[in-house]
Image (spheres, rainbow, N blue to C red):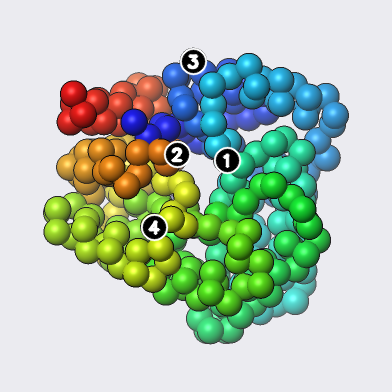
Amino acid sequence: MPLFGAHLSTLRGLHNAITAATALQCGTLQIFTKNASHWSAKPLTQDDINQFRRATSASKLKHLTVHDSYLINLASADDTIYTKSVNAFVDEMERAEALGISYLVTHPGSHTGSGEEAGLARVIQGYEEVHARCAGFNVRVLIETTAGQGTALGHRFEHLAAILQRAACADRMDVCFDTCHVFAAGYALAEVSDYATTFQQFDDLIGLSRLKLFHVNDSAKPFGSRVDRHASIGLGEIGEEAFRRLVTDPRFLDRPMILETPKKDDDGNEMDAINLGRLRSFATERAG
Ligand SMILES: [Zn+2]
Ligand SMILES: [Zn+2]
């Protein structure tokens, strides 16, 4: 069975996310190490780090993942935003490394009008600068597939392929596949043949061996809408068959699969437990 997990809150302390993940019987977990809509944060204290590392090693969680701040835009043509983004991304790397995190997931950013090629050149330069300043780190950057809202890069597999082909630091990077984003970007998943074609395209351009992590989200917005709104598993436009297929796909049985779905439904039900239960039942009903 894949390692199922969820993006969990660290509001009451980083290590509390480990406790919450364990209570949900997760195999993996994603967190922010700081407020994702702020540029800067207090540095982690040695106590924060020790507590988190102790909680991690006492748990069964594997491939701990951090998502970076939403403000970071390494594709920006604006020098001030670009420099701020490089510094903020180095901070994300340092925090993740101190905490013993496996993966740092990031969106490749938005070109904001400079064009795709200029944006790609800029983000490649950004990743190179960041990695040069983080020599020897173990944490691995995963570039996430995006829905392609506005001028966001990453909604075509070609964008990620270009980064991984051209960046001097590409051997330190891989990819996070977000099912909601990919579907909203116009890669079909619902029908068996569409699912096969989408992963074939990914394999041809990027290689499935570079797909290290899934964000498993259904999509509240229609196919090809290029709007990023996550829905609970089976309750969105993708539908549950695609998730049944994904969690039993023999190519992905060792991959972490992380939910970023709504925390509560309209009736106030705690949805992480319900969505994790759905994924587990899909994984076991076919295997058993
Ligand atoms: Zn995601
Ligand atoms: Zn999203």
Q: Image height check: is 1 above or below 169?
A: above
Q: Tell me, for residue 256, which label it has, or none.
A: 2
Q: Quadrant of the N terminus?
A: top left
Whole-Å distance between the Cαs marked 3 and 1? Answer: 18 Å
10 Å neighbourhood of mark 1: few (<14), some, or many (≥20)?
many
Q: Position of residue 6 (x, y in %)?
A: 46, 33
* Residues under numbered marks 3 and 4 in contact, where contact means CB atoms less than 8 Å apart: no
- Label 2 sits on a secondary structure element that is strand
Is 210 left or right of 129, judged from the image as shown? left
Residue type of the residue flagged with mark 2: Pro
Q: Quadrant of the C terminus?
A: top left
Whole-Å distance between the Cαs marked 2 and 1? Answer: 9 Å
Give the residue at x 55% y 54%.
142
- Label 1 sits on a secondary structure element that is strand
- Mark 3 highlights which residue? 23
- Mark 1 highlights which residue? 65
Whole-Å distance between the Cαs marked 2 and 4? Answer: 14 Å
Image depth: mark 3 or mark 4 in front:
4
* Residues under numbered marks 2 and 1 in contact, where contact means CB atoms less than 8 Å apart: yes
Residue type of the residue flagged with mark 3: Ala
Image depth: mark 4 or mark 1 in front:
4
10 Å neighbourhood of mark 3: few (<14), some, or many (≥20)?
few
Q: Position of residue 166 (x, y in %)?
A: 58, 77
Residue type of the residue flagged with mark 1: Thr
- Mark 4 highlights which residue? 208
65 and 217: which is toward the camera = 65
Could one spot residue 29 in this view of the protein?
A: yes
Q: Image height check: is 21 above or below 156?
A: above
Give the residue at x 63% y 16%.
58
* Residues under numbered marks 3 and 1 in contact, where contact means CB atoms less than 8 Å apart: no
Whole-Å distance between the Cαs marked 3 and 2? Answer: 18 Å
10 Å neighbourhood of mark 4: few (<14), some, or many (≥20)?
some
